[in-house]
Image (cartoon, rainbow, N blue to C red):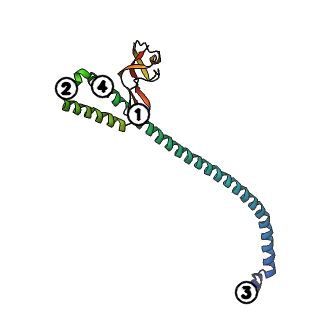
Amino acid sequence: MNDDTQKDDVIIEETPEAKVADAHDDVEYADDNLGDTVKKLKEKIKTLEAEKLEYLTGWQRTKADYVNAKKEDEKNRGELMKYANMGFVEELLPALDAFDMAMANKEAWEKVDKNWRAGIEYIYGQIIATLGKFGVTQENPLGQKVDSQKHNPMGTVVTEDKSKEGTVAEVIQKGYFINGKEIRPAGVKVFE
């Protein structure tokens, strides 16, 4: 019984030729799948490249928008800074007008002590120079043609000289500008 049992349990090993044939069948099967796989991978690559381009374009557009917004913000901030002091200057105008009126009354001004006058004129000059550093300019249009955009007619002066008609005869209040923008037009009397 022992001999017969051992004969039935004999294991047959595959020959090398059989192994090669089985591997060949696997390759043919893989070749069929490989073609499909390559095709799918190529499609996937195209899709991914399209997505990459879309993301890159979007990122570049966003970056450009950010840079443009930053420039616009800096420009707006600069414009705001140019005119930020306008309210302060408007509040200061009555004091500047008082200086102008005091110095315009030549008779009374000449009676004041010379040193005191020089001190007041120096202080006034310092105030005007400081305002100039912040873009504030005065307009004294005496003798100029009246410009309705820059002058506020406050009265008339009769003249016989026809060449003077329509020009500024007297400045009642100087005009003020900040960086070219009008704060207050000059108050003037006009020759007619």
Q: Determine crowd level at label 2: few under 14, some 14-19, many 20+ residues with C-alpha closer than 10 A.
A: few
Q: Say whether residue 101 is left or right of residue 138.
A: left
Instruction: Tell me which amino acid carries mark 3.
Output: Asn
The reply to whether the C-beta atoms of the residues labelled 2 and 4 are less than 8 Å apart is no
**Vertical relation: 159 (above or below) 118:** above
Q: Which residue is mark 4?
A: 100
**Farthest residue, direction front:** 161
Callout 1: 10 Å neighbours few (<14), some, many (20+)? some
Quarter of the image where one finds residue 101: top left
Q: Which residue is mark 1?
A: 83
From the top left corner, tell me how far across and down residue 130 is, in percent.
32, 37
The one of 64 and 112 positioned closer to us in this rendering: 112
Residue 8, quarter of the rendered image: bottom right
Q: Residue at x 22, y 21 (%)?
A: 108
Mark 2–mark 4 Cα distance, whole angstroms, equals 15 Å
Of callouts 2 and 4, the N-terminal one: 4
- Examine the image and state in which quarter residue 142 appears: top left
**Earlier-in-chain disc, 3 versus 1:** 3
Image coords of residue 150 (percent x, y):
44, 24
Question: Which amino acid is tagged 2?
Answer: Val
On the question of residue 106 being in view, the answer is yes
Q: Earlier in the sequence, mark 3 or mark 2?
A: 3
The amino acid pointed to by label 4 is Asp
Question: Nearer the observer, disc 3 or disc 4?
Answer: 4
Kindly report which numbered mark, 1 or 2, lies closer to the viewer in this rendering: 2
Res 2 label: 3
Quarter of the image with the N terminus is: bottom right
Q: Earlier in the sequence, mark 1 or mark 2?
A: 1
**Nearer to us in this view, 149 or 108:** 108
What amino acid type is highlighted by mark number 1? Tyr
Neighbours of disc 4 within 10 Å: few (<14), some (14-19), many (20+): some
